[in-house]
Image (cartoon, helix red, strand yellow):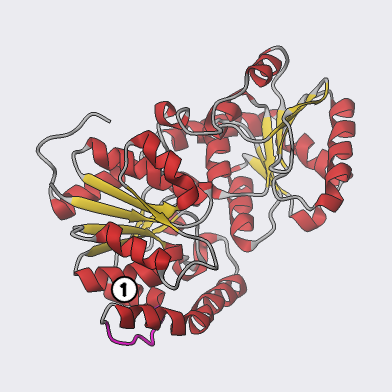
Amino acid sequence: MKTITLITQGNRSEVQPFLALATALQKEGYQVRLAAPAAFAHYARKTGLPFFPISDNAAAPAFEAQRSMLAAAQDANLIIAHLNVLDWAQAIAEKLECHLHIVALQPHAPFLPTTSGWSRLEQALATARHFQDWHSRMKLANAWRREMGLPQQLVCPLRKALKQGTPFLHAYSPTLAGDGEKHGPQHHLTGQWVLSDRFRFRLPGNAPSTEFSEWLYRGGRPVFFDLNGLPASKRETYLKGIQRLSQRQGFRAIISADWVEQEGLYERDIFCLNGVDHEWLFRHCAAIVHHGGSGTIHAGVRAGIPNLLCSTDSSQAYWGRQLEKRGIGVHLPYRQLGESSLEAALDKALQLSAIAKAKAVGQAVSEENGLEYVVDMVAQLLGREQLAVAV
């Protein structure tokens, strides 16, 4: 049986796509291991995956996290690793002499053609930062290489991967990214990797509470506001602004925020959430307002509803431009966000033409199957397993 090791670091948005890929590969009969932050061990247990915890404790012994990645990759035929662990995964694949695929969950400047919607200046600056960052990491990365008996490496791992023809899996929607995202045979625009409904509701924090479900179903479709990560000094201002906007325009509102101590009614037409499954929730919303994370925007588009995107960086602004180009949402940079600008943007997002286009594009994105794309790639590389397992 062929063995595939998946490696990722970060928060839930960086881990859940790898869980989705792991279950798809398991179903095809491959043996799959996952190396991810220790906090996600319970997620892996829900899917029956062999799990190798990666410590994010700065006080942990040197290379503890990397050794866990190495242990997960022993005897693997293929490593599929997030771009954020490229320094370590590339060295491990070199040491173990196994295949390596690199995953990008959202667009990155070094990969994008000039037709992508990024300005030449944005691309040049972002690419330069990426390669310059290597100099701050090079000493530690080479210490890890020495521990594994590998020679010193001066070239940036990303530049090396691009030169060597390492396959890159761009796990986001070709419908949203458009034709300008075709990079050539080394780069594969797969579509997003979505965990099945059955598995998502088995994961902690995904199932809605009874109180929220009852509130959701007894009124009109609400507008979803993502206020996660909002500084404490601005929370009350935004809550009051949304409250006034809700009263003026007559819509109900859901406020999703990681700083909400206890979920429940803020007032009759506003419900505060700690978190719930976006794929399920957005099907019941009229529109969503968020900062433009790749997972959130894909779930919102699949739901067939307008997105109002308040970007804080160039990657999020990229998605905002894609929404406006297709007429399915509004891009309002965070620096321009205020009560009046938010109200005007919502009015524009909820026009009938935008709603109709959002449904059509949502259907197209829903029909994409990023997992099937990757499974077929793996089968071409490693061969298909004879005995598929039920997952």
Residue assigned mark 1: 91
> Is residue 301 inside the magenta stretch?
no
**Residue at the extreme left:** 386
Is 341 left, or right, of 167 in this rendering?
right
Residue 206 in percent (x, y) is at: 54, 31
Residue occupying image coordinates x 76% and y 50%: 230
- Disc 1 marks a residue whose amino acid type is Ala
Q: Nearer the viewer, residue 46 or 326?
A: 46
Residue occupying image coordinates x 58% and y 50%: 322
Q: Name above or below for residue 218 compared with residue 49.
A: above
Residue 375 in percent (x, y) is at: 25, 45
Is 14 left, or right, of 333 in this rendering?
left
Q: Which residues are magenta?
A: 150-156
Image quadrant where residue 154 sits: bottom left
Residue 197 in percent (x, y) is at: 43, 27
**Residue at the extreme top:** 218
For mark 1, give the secondary structure: helix
